[in-house]
Structure formats: structure tokens, C-alpha cells
Image (cartoon, rainbow, N blue to C red):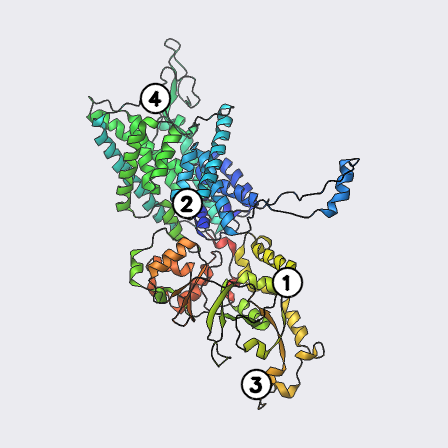
């Protein structure tokens, strides 16, 4: 909470948000990665009823993110005909002549980096369960918003390597057989048609329990301290840990039962005698404590589950420690399924009911009720248990549990957590039916701030300081009144491009006629002096976020980012009389009482920036009459940041961002008033997707990266 708050929680939800197009501050930072690894080891070892699969997803994505910084290959060097005497002399003679010739990867754009992180996160999930195919399918079905064949085979390669390494670490040899980190012992792959009705009952009830868990978690979330109260979060984690550890030691002592160990299982590691007596010398039968074996054994081994685990799981959920809910959900489902299996044995003594199979069905149904996924969970359970013989009960449990849980509680665990985050705007794969009733005019931000093709530096600096927008339409005047703010859309330029142009001093002197006159496509552009300089600027624009605030992009939207450019000194120096004769005017020309004010303006000059060489000349646009559902599909499918809304004459009448789409998707059309827009600016940290209304400066100064909720599963 004090060193790396982004390491709290499981991380799966925020990985989903990042892959959907949101920027999460410090989430993939190396400090967060190291803290996550150490915190996960401590959390799992402490006995808390939470799993390691969620943190492993975050760790896999963070490792992939770190590797994206190791771009490029060693530069190509020309070898000398004469062999050098030593390697040191070779390096000393050639090190100043090294020049990069080519690059293997290009992770400067968010698309390639997002695909690489998707593969790393899938490898983390595969390492948690020993399920290479299940890890790929889970991310394709649940987490990744943009999927392709290239991402699939890359992820498949990563998950295969992760599973083989896991197999070697467990068995000290590489093997193509699945390691299977989930074990259900003493199961016989035998069931008949008469068992299917019992499987249906177990699946329906376990799915309802999973939906009930989501309801309880949503209700308890409103009473838990937020991430802003760091001390309370730490106190809560300590209190829950104390309760869990006390329960682990006290419950087996007072409520545990001493049971005999079955023949052939005496050498297993997960039997704990605890307070039970030693083995009988006459019969040689060894005993074990059932609750102690449950709480002290390896969490992946399920032998005699207990209902107390459900209460501990509810308490430990959403505390400020690295941990996931996948494995605890399996534990609860296993306990519930085995409990139902024992009941079925009592009521149907003539049937060969195996509580172990019902434990497997209950665990699968619990996962379906909590997460609402289908295909990936089937593959994960089959690969994790290594039991392809139980495929039919697993499929049946997934289908029924999803159907029951959807009618009890519509949203899954990850969807519920995403709805509780105000800073993240997640776009679902399918638009809401409510969007049929509204158009782009109803969800757009109408107060658009735009630039002309050639704009004065003073105006640019003022706009950058007064707003946090990350995209600006470029307009061109087409009527006689050149001083009007209306104009046709000719392009879009991003905020970081404008900041880079000011940082590199891509400015020139321009008079009032140059700033306001009409232009044509054939008008000459203000390009750099050489093609190499232009390529250099293009490269800098691509790596801007890697060089400036790589893990906190929202800082580039603050006024401090403009102040760091030291552009005010340049403007003052240019406007000072005597420094630049062309820019100085006498007092009579600047007098507001002067009769010919326009003539006085034309005699002066200003510093200006030409956006035409750098802007996007073909931005996607929609008409204001376009259906909001169509807008959502375009925005979500293409992964847009800004979508300009134009009228019949190609004039910009509004702009749509991720926040506008997310709010409209939730049915909050009536919240698009000017007051609500001002308040929502403080909560927007998604890859620069902000609407274009005027925002007070205080909202940026009060913003903190710790305001993002980092305690998600």
C-alpha cells in the first residue's frame, strides 16, 4: 500500500481493463512486479484462503511488459580484414562507430505491446494450473478485447513453454504430459445415466452459490476502506490474516476428527496428524486430522473439504494483498459438491454415488457461477485434473451453472469489479440494446476545442494548460469570415504530438494573415530542413510515452507538462521589444483606441506551429444522426481513442470518447450535462480518452495515481 499499491489484489481485472484500452498507472512497473512476486509468496504461505492464479496473471503480463523495453538487436559492425589483437582493443576501436541498423521488434505502439502482454498473462494462468490450452482460451474468451490469429499462436507458444517449465520443476524432467496442479484423489471414471440427474442438482445449486458469492462480495465492498485510506487497508489485511490463522489452528484442535488413513496413501504428504494419537502398534493404522489436513496441506490437494473455508474466503476477498479467487472458488465448490455427494449416498444407497465426482462437478459449477465463462473453464478443469473421462459432467455443470447464475446475478466477478471502478471505462464486446434508441448526437461532447492548421504558440499553450484533452480536431476555414471559429475538418492531432512539437521547437514566425487566411491542399508545408530530421521527429512521436511518463501517462495532461517545456520564456523573449524587430510594435499600434485595429494586428508577428505535416489526415468520423449502437461497434472494434462527429458540411459538431461510450452503454444518457462532465474529468485516466469540455485546473492538481482502486481480484 505504501511502496507499490498497484501490486494489491489479484490483478486480473486491471489486466482486462488494460487490454481493453485503459491505462493503469504503475501497473506494469518493475517495482510493482517485484512486490507482486514477494507478496504472492508471503500471502500463499500465510494460509489466507486466496489463490495464486490471479497474481500469476499479473506477473506474467508484467514480465512481458518489462521485455518490451528490451527492444532492438546489437548494431551491425563491419569486421576488419586484419584480426585485432584482443577483444578489448576491438571494442575500444569500434564502440564509437556503432550505429543501429535495424530493429527486431517495435513495441513503441500500444498495439504490439498489448499483444505481447496478452501472451505473458496467458502464460501466467497456464503456469497456475498446468493448462496450456486453457490459458489461451481463458484470455481469448474473458480477458483480451482484441484477439487475432497472431496473438493466439504466440500465446500458445508461451503457455506451452510455461507448462513444460512447470512440469520440470515438479518432476525434475521435461515432459509433454500435463503436470495437472488440481488433484482429485481416488476418483473412478465410472458413472452411468442415472447419475446425470444428480449432476444436474449439484450443478444448479453450486451455480447459485457462485452467484451468491458475487452478491455478498458486492455488498461487502461498500463497507471496506478504499485505497485512499492506506493505513485502514493495512489494518484490515492484518485483522483478516489474524482471524484466518487463528481459525487454521483452533478449528482443527476443537472440531477436527481423527480418521484412519486408507491403505496405500500412508506416504502422501498432505496427511497431518496434528492432535491425533500416534499409530496403533497392534493394527498399525495411522490417523490424521481432517481439518488440519485441509488447512495445512498444499492448497491444490482436495481430500476432505469443510464449510468453514467459505466464511474465511468471504473475509479475505478484496483485501490489500496479492491473491486471486480462482482457487478458493474451486475449494468452496469442491466442499459443496462433496457435501451433496454424501447426502446422495444416504438417500440413494443402492446407487454407486461417488462424492469425489460430485466434488469435481461442484468445483466446475462454482467457477461457472462466479466467472461466467464456458469453454475455457472446461479445458482448464480437464487439463488441470488430467481427467478427460469426466468431460461430460464438466460440460454439463458449466452450462447449467452459467444459466442459473445469470438469472440470480447478471454480472460475473470481474464484471462487477469493473463496474465499481470509476477511473476505468470498460467496453463490453456487445453493445447494450438501449443504444438503439439514441444517436451520436445524444452521447457526444458538443463543446469541442479545435486548432487551425497553423496556430499560434500562445493559443496552443493556453489550450494545453486549460484542458486535459488528448486529441484536437484540425479545421480549415472555407468562408469569407476568416476570424470565425467554424471550419471543415481536415485532420486530428494528439496531445503528445503537440507537446513534442513544442519541445523540439518546431515553430516559426508568422503574421496575422498567415494565421488566419484560407489555405489549400497545394499550400507548402512547414517541414523540417532535412528528411532525416523529419524521420527523427516521427520516431520521437512514436516513443513519446516511453520517454515521458511511461507508467503514468495522465501526467502529460497536466499543466506541469507544459511548464516543463519552458515555452513561456521563449514567448517573452520573442515579444520583448528590441530582441526581434519584426515582432515589436509601438504603443500607438497596440492602443485599443486605435481606429485601425486590424491594421495594427497585421503589422505584428507571432510564433506559430504548422500541424499539417504531423496530423492524421484521414480520421474516422460519423454523422450526428448515426445510431449510437453503430458508433459503439465502430469504437469498440477498431479500438479508437476519439471519434469526431460532423454535420452535412463536414464541420465538427461534437466528439465521442471512451468515457462517453461507456456511460451511454450503462444507460446513463441523462447524465450528459455540463456539470456532470466537469466532475467526470477527475475520474478519467484511460489512455487519454477524455471529452473536450473546459475543465478547471484544480481537478488536475488534486489528482493522484493512488486514487485508482488496486485491490481487485
Figure quadrant of the C terminus: top left
Report the side of 547 relative to 646 (left or right).
right
| Residue 186: mark | 4
Q: Mark 2 or mark 1, which has the lower sequence index?
A: 2
What residue is pinned by disc 2? 143
Q: Estimate how packed mark 3 is, as few (under 14), some (14 to 19) or many (20 or more) residues with alpha carbons within 10 Å.
A: few
| Residue 178: mark | none
Q: Classify residue 9 by image quadrant.
A: top left
Identify whether 708 is placed above or below 292: below
x then y, percent, for residue 296: 43, 28
Q: Mark 3 or mark 4, which has the lower sequence index?
A: 4
Query: In front of the other: label 3 or label 4?
Result: 3
x then y, percent, for residue 80: 76, 40
Query: In front of the other: label 4 or label 2?
Result: 2
- Name the residue rendered at 58%, 58% in the picture: 541
Report the side of 588 relative to 213 (left or right).
right
- Cβ–Cβ below 8 Å for labels 3 and 4? no
- Name the residue rendered at 36%, 23% in the picture: 185
Q: CA distance from mark 3 to mark 1?
A: 32 Å
Q: CA distance from mark 1 to mark 4?
A: 70 Å
Q: Estimate how packed mark 2 is, as few (under 14), some (14 to 19) or many (20 or more) residues with alpha carbons within 10 Å.
A: many
x then y, percent, for residue 573: 68, 73
Q: CA distance from mark 2 to mark 3?
A: 59 Å
Q: Mark 2 or mark 3, which has the lower sequence index?
A: 2
Q: CA distance from mark 2 to mark 1?
A: 39 Å
| Residue 598: mark | 3
What residue is pinned by disc 1? 504
Q: Mark 1 or mark 4, which has the lower sequence index?
A: 4
Amino acid at each position: 500500500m505504501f511502496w507499490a499499491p498497484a501490486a494489491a489484489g489479484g490483478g486480473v481485472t486491471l489486466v482486462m481493463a488494460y487490454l481493453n484500452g485503459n491505462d493503469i498507472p504503475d501497473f506494469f512497473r518493475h517495482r510493482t512486479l517485484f512486490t507482486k512476486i514477494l507478496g504472492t509468496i508471503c500471502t500463499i504461505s500465510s494460509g489466507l484462503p486466496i489463490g495464486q492464479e490471479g497474481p500469476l496473471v499479473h506477473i506474467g503480463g508484467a514480465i512481458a511488459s518489462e521485455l518490451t523495453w528490451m527492444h532492438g538487436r546489437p548494431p551491425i559492425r563491419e569486421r576488419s580484414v586484419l584480426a585485432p589483437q584482443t577483444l578489448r582493443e576491438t571494442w575500444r576501436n569500434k564502440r564509437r562507430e556503432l550505429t543501429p541498423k535495424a530493429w527486431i521488434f517495435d513495441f513503441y505502439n500500444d498495439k504490439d505491446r498489448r499483444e505481447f502482454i496478452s501472451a505473458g498473462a496467458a502464460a501466467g494462468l497456464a503456469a497456475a494450473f498446468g493448462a496450456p490450452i486453457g490459458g489461451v482460451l481463458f484470455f481469448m474468451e474473458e480477458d483480451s478485447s482484441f484477439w487475432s490469429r497472431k496473438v493466439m499462436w504466440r500465446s500458445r507458444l508461451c503457455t506451452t513453454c510455461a507448462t513444460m517449465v512447470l512440469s520440470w520443476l515438479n518432476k525434475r524432467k521435461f515432459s509433454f504430459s500435463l503436470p495437472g496442479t488440481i488433484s482429485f484423489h481416488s476418483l473412478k471414471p465410472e458413472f452411468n445415466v442415472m447419475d446425470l440427474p444428480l449432476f444436474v442438482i449439484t450443478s444448479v445449486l453450486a451455480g447459485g452459490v457462485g452467484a451468491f458469492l458475487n452478491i455478498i462480495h458486492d455488498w461487502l465492498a461498500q463497507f471496506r476502506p478504499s485505497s485512499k485510506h492506506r493505513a485502514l487497508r493495512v489494518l484490515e489485511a492484518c485483522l483478516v490474516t489474524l482471524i484466518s490463522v487463528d481459525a487454521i489452528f483452533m478449528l482443527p484442535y476443537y472440531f477436527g476428527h481423527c480418521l484412519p488413513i486408507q491403505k496405500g496413501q500412508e506416504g502422501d504428504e498432505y496427511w497431518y496428524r496434528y492432535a491425533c494419537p500416534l499409530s496403533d502398534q497392534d493394527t498399525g493404522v495411522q490417523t490424521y486430522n481432517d481439518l488440519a489436513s485441509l488447512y495445512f496441506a498444499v492448497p491444490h490437494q482436495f481430500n476432505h473439504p469443510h464449510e468453514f473455508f467459505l466464511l474465511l474466503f468471504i473475509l479475505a476477498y478484496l483485501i490489500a494483498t496479492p491473491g486471486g479467487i480462482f482457487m478458493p472458488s474451486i475449494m468452496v465448490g469442491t466442499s459443496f459438491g462433496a457435501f451433496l455427494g454424501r447426502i446422495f449416498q444416504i438417500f440413494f444407497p443402492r446407487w454407486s454415488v461417488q462424492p469425489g465426482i460430485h466434488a469435481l462437478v461442484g468445483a466446475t459449477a462454482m467457477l461457472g457461477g462466479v466467472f461466467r465463462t464456458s469453454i475455457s473453464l472446461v479445458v482448464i478443469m480437464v487439463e488441470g485434473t488430467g481427467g478427460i473421462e469426466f468431460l461430460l459432467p464438466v460440460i454439463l455443470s458449466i452450462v447449467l451453472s452459467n444459466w442459473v447464475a445469470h438469472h440470480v446475478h447478471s454480472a460475473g466477478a470481474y464484471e462487477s469489479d469493473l463496474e465499481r471502478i470509476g477511473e476505468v471505462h470498460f467496453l463490453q464486446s456487445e453493445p447494450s440494446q438501449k443504444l438503439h434508441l439514441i444517436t451520436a448526437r445524444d452521447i457526444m461532447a458538443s463543446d469541442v476545442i479545435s486548432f487551425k492548421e497553423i496556430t499560434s504558440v500562445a493559443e496552443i499553450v493556453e489550450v494545453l494548460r486549460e484542458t486535459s484533452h488528448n486529441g484536437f480536431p484540425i479545421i480549415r476555414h472555407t468562408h469569407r469570415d476568416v476570424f470565425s471559429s467554424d471550419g471543415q475538418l481536415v485532420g486530428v492531432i494528439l496531445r503528445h504530438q503537440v507537446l513534442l512539437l513544442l519541445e523540439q521547437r518546431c515553430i516559426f514566425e508568422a503574421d496575422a494573415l498567415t494565421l488566419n487566411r484560407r489555405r489549400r491542399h497545394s499550400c507548402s508545408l512547414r517541414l523540417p530542413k532535412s528528411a532525416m530530421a523529419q524521420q527523427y521527429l516521427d520516431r520521437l512521436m512514436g516513443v513519446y510515452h516511453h520517454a515521458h511518463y511511461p507508467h503514468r501517462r495522465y501526467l502529460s495532461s497536466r499543466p506541469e507538462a507544459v511548464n516543463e517545456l519552458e515555452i513561456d520564456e521563449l514567448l517573452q523573449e520573442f515579444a520583448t521589444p528590441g530582441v526581434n524587430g519584426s515582432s515589436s510594435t509601438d504603443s500607438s499600434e497596440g492602443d485599443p483606441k486605435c481606429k485601425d485595429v486590424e491594421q495594427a494586428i497585421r503589422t505584428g508577428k507571432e510564433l506559430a506551429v504548422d500541424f499539417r505535416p504531423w496530423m492524421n489526415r484521414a480520421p474516422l468520423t460519423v454523422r450526428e444522426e448515426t445510431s449510437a449502437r453503430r458508433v459503439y461497434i465502430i469504437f469498440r472494434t477498431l479500438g479508437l481513442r476519439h471519434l469526431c462527429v460532423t454535420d452535412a458540411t463536414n464541420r465538427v459538431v461534437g466528439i465521442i470518447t471512451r468515457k462517453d461510450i461507456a456511460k451511454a452503454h450503462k444507460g446513463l444518457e441523462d447524465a450528459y450535462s455540463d456539470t456532470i462532465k466537469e466532475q467526470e474529468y477527475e475520474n478519467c485516466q484511460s489512455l487519454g480518452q477524455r471529452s473536450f469540455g473546459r475543465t478547471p485546473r484544480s481537478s488536475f492538481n488534486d489528482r493522484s495515481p493512488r486514487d485508482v482502486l488496486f485491490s481487485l481480484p
